[in-house]
Image (spheres, helix red, strand yellow):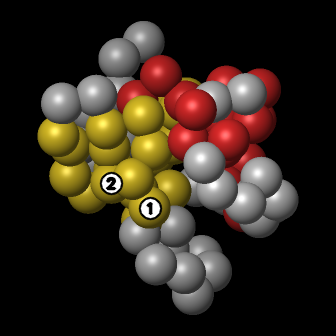
Amino acid sequence: MAVKKGDLVRAVREKLENSLEAQASDTRFPPYLFETKGEIVDMRDDYALVKFGQVPTPNIWLRVDQLEVFE
């Protein structure tokens, strides 16, 4: 299922941990990326800007194939 602006999502651990982005930065991802709801607030090409509102954190750009709709 394709994600769109306004969707509630979470990151898919397997896709994020094995990504090029993970290799270029700290691979110790915080648990809230995988466990809490984030809202897509903007989209550009293959990336979505996700706001995790349950915890005080900055918004984060993730590839849309690294996200799944939170059910």
Q: Closer to the camera, 43 or 40?
A: 43
Label 1 secondary element: strand
Residue density around tag 1, few if under 14, some if 14–19, many if 20 or more, within 10 Å: some
Q: Is residue 33 left or right of residue 59?
A: right
The residue drawn where x is 58% and y is 55% is 37
Which amino acid type is marked by label 1? Ile
Q: Dot 2, crowdedness within 10 Å: few (<14), some or many (≥20)?
A: some
Indicate the quadrant containing the N terminus: top left, top right, bottom left or bottom right: top left
Residue at image coords 41%, 69% = 59
> Which residue was labeled with disc 1?
60
- View extreme (front): residue: 24
Q: Looking at the picture, which amino acid does disc 2 mark?
A: Leu
The residue identified by callout 2 is 49
Q: Is residue 34 left or right of residue 47?
A: right
Q: Is residue 31 left or right of residue 32?
A: right
Q: Position of residue 60 (x, y in %)?
A: 44, 61
Q: Position of residue 4 (x, y in %)?
A: 26, 33
The residue positioned 33% from the left and 54% from the top of the image is 49
Q: Residue placed at 32% from the left, 44% from the top?
A: 48
Q: Are marks 2 and 1 in contact (CB under 8 Å)?
A: yes
Task: Give the Cα distance between marks 2 and 1.
Answer: 6 Å
Residue 70 drawn at (x, y percent): 58, 38
Say which mark, if any, is on residue 71.
Answer: none
Q: Secondary structure at mark 2?
A: strand
* Image-quadrant location for residue 57: bottom right
Q: Is residue 43 above or below residue 12?
A: below
Q: Give the mark count.
A: 2
